[in-house]
Image (tube, rainbow, N blue to C red):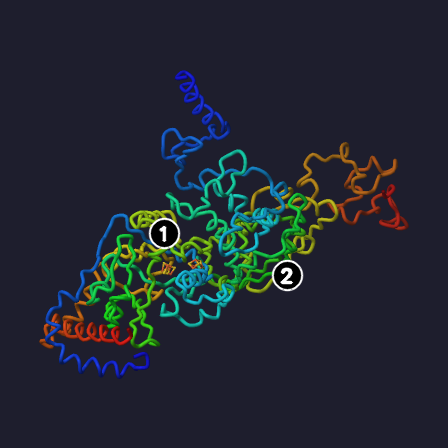
């Protein structure tokens, strides 16, 4: 009997330690989270969350559960309807901001830890550093919601009649389409004049993703009352931050700060080089390889396509397959002075044959 | 008796007063010892004004637990009430007021109720010992002893004790009792229990000070480095954290000197007119004590 109990005593700690395999492989010092030397599952002796230091992301927003019904407090006196939390919609929105960690602020690698594993369901408890579950859940929602709307009435979340929602087959809600501004004009204090910013050109033509520029945005950056926006005193550096990923904001002030509101940038008009159908799909950096420098390319094919020659150039990618009579010609014969837009036939033919009525091959 | 108004009452007491001046010469008997115990176990509440959302559920719960006609909980969603600043009074022991916000709290919501001082001025000021500081931190008021002199109201640095002027005769002082009865039954104060965001943290006072310091240290941008009530007037059971200077939230700027200084100053003021304060207390106290005895008898 004694032997048996000894055995059990020995086995229990082994089980406890062996269980969280991934957990024990953490690269953190145990004492970051635990206050005692040998934490067990029943007595994990957890310290207050070290939050940002230990967080990992586990799955993408698309894989997140659609709806989560929060109904832990059904029986208390202030009985409100359970909350049907549109988890997936929030997960997707969080991608623009701090990611899953905004809410799952304490999650060692492995499965997603339920809120109630750290936040006690009882308000009477020993460790007061972590808010209880009711407080934590409410804060998690209200902290953001009340920043952009003073409407934090209970019924805004605690809707009646949510019982017919099928947890397994959630109807997803999405963030409504964001209306993108076409042009923004900044009347700058520091320098006389304006910065004219063509927002939609940056996304539609230059292929920028939202978070290429909106690096540290959270929901409240948009969902905030105007008066609050005025209170946000961004430093000069922070203001430039959105642009400095692509543009030289340290030296070349005049390329953006102009005396007048400027027209939008169109490659053909502003630089004389028409991007046409091939180049319009190339990212800016594909041609302008020096970071933050967009000037200095001559516009000739050879400036970028250094290895193109008569031997290896497939003319058909331009849409025109040269016929036998023309396939051996030098480029210069038709494209005089690197003018690829208006080829000439004059070098071989008389005036009766001209481009584009007569073609040196077949258009595809 | 019930129909007697306040003026009649004062007339009565002043006429008896002359007669009873001699009786009042035994003041020690009247001024009961305050139960001024400062236990290490005493509890408190830490109010985090950066967390409070101004839902006023605490107001409702407080009234409900004290049989003070709470009405429908949904009525407490009315935000227009924040247009004017309110004080706790005989209809409510606690109120939420709104202050201009900042990027951390918008607006700042501030719960006001009795601070439950460690060295309560009201206890010192009360000449009949109707106020007492309990071992668990509560400063409570005993109706059976109160003579309605309202010295407590003058003494309190936070102007908390409220008088029900609708009842001129039966002294009726109102203030938060830190839910002494609920706590005695192992329950949380009603306001703490209902708060949806746990803006009110209930616990051992010493633990709460540690907790508050911890929060300030971890979030130096969120909080000003000041726990209101940690040292003010010798320390209070209810303490506050804030993102702005407490003076902007109408908190009185108070030193760590104990508040009974306030009641002393009443005495000192009287002393300046060469009236020994004890004699005056004895006189006033005697008058009121006797008139209370008298009114009690009349009611019987
Ligand atoms: S502690 Fe009790 S009496 Fe005091 S404000 Fe809270 S609910 Fe009201
Ligand atoms: S219940 Fe809590 S959050 Fe609501 S007003 Fe009272 S202290 Fe603030």
Tell me the element at label 2: loop
Q: Is residue A239 visible?
A: no
Residue B201: give x, y in percent of width and height: 38, 52
Q: Is residue A16 left or right of residue B182?
A: right
Residue at horizontal 51 percent and vertical 50 percent from the top? A73
User: Closer to the observer: label 1 or label 2?
Assistant: 1
In the image, farthest residue toward the right: A352
Q: How far is disc 1 from disc 2 in space, using C-alphas? A: 74 Å
Label drawn at residue B185? 1
- Where A149 sits versus B86, above or below? above
**Which numbered circle lies on residue A220?**
none
Residue at the image position 57 percent from the left and 52 percent from the top: A83
* Number of numbered discs overlaid on the protein picture: 2
Is there one chain holding both mark 1 and mark 2? no
Note whether ligand 1 is within 8 Å of mark 1. Answer: no
Q: Nearer the viewer, residue A207 or B148?
A: B148
Whole-percent x, y for residue A279 in the image: 71, 45
Give me the chain letter of mark 1: B
In this rendering, the answer to whether B242 lies above or below B163 is: above
Q: Nearer the viewer, residue B113 or B97?
A: B113
Q: Point out residue A277 in the picture as x, y percentages from the top left corner.
A: 75, 47
Quick one: label 1, few (<14), some, or many (20+) residues within 10 Å?
few
* Circle 2 residue: A263
Is residue A261 in sight in this rendering? yes
């Amino acid at each position: 009997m004694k032997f048996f109990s000894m055995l059990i005593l020995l086995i229990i700690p082994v089980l406890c330690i062996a269980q969280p395999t991934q957990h024990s492989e953490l690269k953190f010092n145990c004492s970051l989270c635990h206050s005692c030397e040998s934490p067990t599952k029943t007595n994990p002796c957890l310290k207050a969350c070290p939050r940002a230091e230990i967080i990992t992301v586990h799955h993408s927003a698309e894989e997140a559960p659609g709806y989560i019904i929060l109904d832990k407090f059904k029986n208390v006196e202030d009985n409100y309807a359970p909350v049907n939390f549109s988890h997936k919609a929030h997960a997707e929105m969080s991608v623009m901001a701090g990611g899953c960690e905004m809410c799952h602020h304490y999650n060692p690698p492995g499965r997603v830890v339920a809120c109630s594993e750290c936040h006690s369901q009882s308000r009477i408890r020993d460790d007061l550093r972590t808010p209880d579950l009711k407080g934590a859940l409410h804060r998690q929602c209200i902290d953001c919601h009340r920043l952009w709307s003073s409407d934090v009435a209970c019924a805004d979340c605690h809707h009646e009649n949510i019982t017919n929602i099928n947890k397994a087959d959630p109807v997803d809600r999405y963030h409504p389409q964001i209306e993108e501004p076409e042009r923004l004009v900044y009347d700058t204090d520091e320098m006389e004049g304006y910065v004219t910013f063509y927002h939609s050109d940056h996304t539609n033509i230059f292929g920028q993703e939202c978070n290429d520029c909106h690096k540290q945005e959270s929901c409240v950056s948009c969902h905030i009352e105007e008066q609050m926006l005025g209170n946000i005193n961004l430093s000069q550096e922070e203001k430039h931050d959105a642009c400095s990923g692509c543009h030289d904001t340290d030296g070349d002030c005049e390329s953006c700060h102009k005396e007048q509101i400027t027209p939008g940038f169109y490659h053909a008009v502003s630089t004389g080089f028409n991007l046409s159908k091939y180049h319009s799909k190339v990212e800016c950096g594909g041609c302008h390889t020096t970071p933050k420098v967009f000037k200095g390319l001559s516009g000739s094919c050879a400036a970028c396509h250094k290895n193109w020659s008569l031997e290896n150039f497939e003319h058909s990618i331009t849409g025109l397959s040269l016929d036998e009579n023309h396939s051996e010609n030098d480029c210069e014969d038709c494209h005089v002075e690197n003018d690829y837009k208006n080829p000439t036939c004059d070098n071989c033919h008389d005036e009766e044959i001209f481009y584009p009525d007569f073609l040196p091959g077949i258009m595809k | 008796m019930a129909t007697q108004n306040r003026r009649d009452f004062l007339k009565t007491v002043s006429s008896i007063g002359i007669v009873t001046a001699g009786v009042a010469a035994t003041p020690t008997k009247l001024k009961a010892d305050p139960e001024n115990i400062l236990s290490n176990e005493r509890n408190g509440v830490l109010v985090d004004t950066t967390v409070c959302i101004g839902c006023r559920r605490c107001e409702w719960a407080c009234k409900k637990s004290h049989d003070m006609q709470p009405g429908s909980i949904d009525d407490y969603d009315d935000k227009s009430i924040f247009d004017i600043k309110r004080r706790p009074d005989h209809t409510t022991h606690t109120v939420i007021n709104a202050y201009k916000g900042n990027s951390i709290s918008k607006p700042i919501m501030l719960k006001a109720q009795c601070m439950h001082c460690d060295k309560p001025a009201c206890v010192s000021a009360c000449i009949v010992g109707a106020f007492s500081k309990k071992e668990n931190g509560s400063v409570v008021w005993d109706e059976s002893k109160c003579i309605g002199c309202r010295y407590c109201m003058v003494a309190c640095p936070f102007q908390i004790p409220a008088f029900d002027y609708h009842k001129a005769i039966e002294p009726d002082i109102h203030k938060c009792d830190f839910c002494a009865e609920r706590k005695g039954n192992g329950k949380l104060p009603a306001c703490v229990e209902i708060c949806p965001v746990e803006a009110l943290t209930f616990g051992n006072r010493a633990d709460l000070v540690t907790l508050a310091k911890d929060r300030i240290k971890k979030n130096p941008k969120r909080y000003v480095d000041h726990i209101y009530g940690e040292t003010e007037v010798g320390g209070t059971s209810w303490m506050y954290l804030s993102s702005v200077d407490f003076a902007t939230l109408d908190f009185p700027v108070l030193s760590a000197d104990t508040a009974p200084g306030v009641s002393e100053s009443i005495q000192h003021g009287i002393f300046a007119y060469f009236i020994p304060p004890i004699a005056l207390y004895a006189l006033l106290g005697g008058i009121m004590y006797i008139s209370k005895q008298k009114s009690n008898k009349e009611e019987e």
